Image (tube, grey):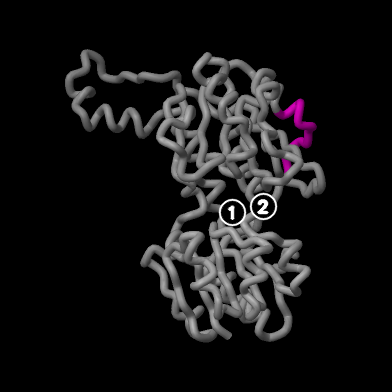
Amino acid sequence: MNIVVLDGYTLNPGDLSWAELQALGPCEIHARTPAAELIPRARDAEILLTNKTVLQREHFEQLPRLKYIGVLATGTNVVDLAAARERGIPVTNAPAYGTNSVAQATFALLLELTQRTGHHAQTVREGRWSRNADWCYWDYPLIELAGQTLGLVGFGRIGQAVARIGLAFGMSVLAYNPSERSGVAGVRFADLEAIFRQSDVVSLHCPLTSNNLGLVSRERLAVMKPGAFLLNTGRGLLVDEAALADALNSGRLAGAGLDVLATEPPAADHPLLRAANCLITPHLAWATRAARLRLLGIVVANIRDFLSGQPQNVVN
């Protein structure tokens, strides 16, 4: 079967091998696909792989040979799942490949907010310690995590991994998960209001749905503890970004650590890019080489299972 990868660059910018995928059939790999090039490139595809390139109903109507769609990620909001199902096209995703990497990145953001290691290391490199009158200095409050309350919104694989790290730091951990309450010893479940009111750190690990757009609203930010932190390694649209910028600039929150924004990449005048005590990384929490290698392995295995008549990780 003809395989077309629409946007393979972020998965494999050159440090991985496509050989296992190419062994499955004729394979055309594009680093990125502009909207105008989608149909010409995908016209002969029977197997179509996408990461962020959006596939909608009108595309399927122009791709009569299409038999399978694989998403090079866990989230599947880039594909019109209902339209694909109506045409008998299975859509698969790649779950759980980045659990440890995203949990690690979550704490990288939190540790930078509480310890400012990167900032202080840069000041040393610039010569400030050499010129300092005292044997030590710091520019921000240094915050110990032990005894702080970590509130997790979403308690799937990543939320649970973050909980374990928080417990190892001596934090108290609260979790909110509306559908499933699989346990991690030492974690207490709470409703959303309690999470936002009681936590010193609120961290988002829930999928984006039509029901939780703007979950972190101006009202929820207003009930957070003065001096609390917000972390988001989930999806940007979970947060009212203008309200968050206001909360940071007014000093209502101590800081935010974000790996995702509502629009990526952001406009140069995005309010959070210059908000007080706001650390933003460019959606890289998932992107360790180990995680991307696992992701590519799941993608290849999904196609093999489909070709054998036993598709796995079908989301529609």
Q: Residue at x 80, y 42 (%)?
A: 178
Tell me if residue 167 can be seen.
no
Classify 10 Å Cα crowding around label 2: few (below 14), some (14-19), many (20 and above). some
Q: Residue 127 versus residue 307: which sits nearer the camera?
A: 307
Give the number of the disc on residue 157.
2
287 sits left or right of 223 in the view: left
Q: Residue 65 versus residue 6: which sits nearer the camera?
A: 65
Boundaries of the magenta span: 185-195
Asked which secondary structure carries label 1, the reply is: helix
The three-letter amino acid code for the residue at tag 2 is: Arg
253 vs 285: above or below: above
Q: Mark 1 or mark 2, which has the lower sequence index?
A: 1
Q: Which residue is drawn at 51% across and 78% down?
A: 21
Is there a contact, CB below 8 Å, between mark 1 and mark 2?
yes
Q: Distance between the residues labelled 1 and 2?
A: 6 Å
Asked which secondary structure carries label 2, the reply is: helix
Task: Inspect the magenta stretch and tell me whether residue 95 lies in it.
Answer: no
Task: Inspect the magenta stretch and tell me whether residue 187 lies in it.
Answer: yes
Q: Residue 200 versus residue 286: which sits nearer the camera?
A: 286
Classify 10 Å Cα crowding around label 1: few (below 14), some (14-19), many (20 and above). some
Q: Which residue is drawn at 51% across and 41% down?
A: 259
Image quarter of the N terminus:
bottom right
Spot occupied by residue 275 in the image (x, y as percentages of width and height): 46, 24
Q: Residue 136 versus residue 262: which sits nearer the camera?
A: 262
234 sits left or right of 290 in the view: right
122 sits left or right of 158 in the view: left
Spot occupied by residue 101 in the image (x, y as percentages of width and height): 52, 52
Quadrant in which residue 121 is drawn: top left
204 vs 285: above or below: above
Give the number of the disc on residue 99.
1
The three-letter amino acid code for the residue at tag 1 is: Thr
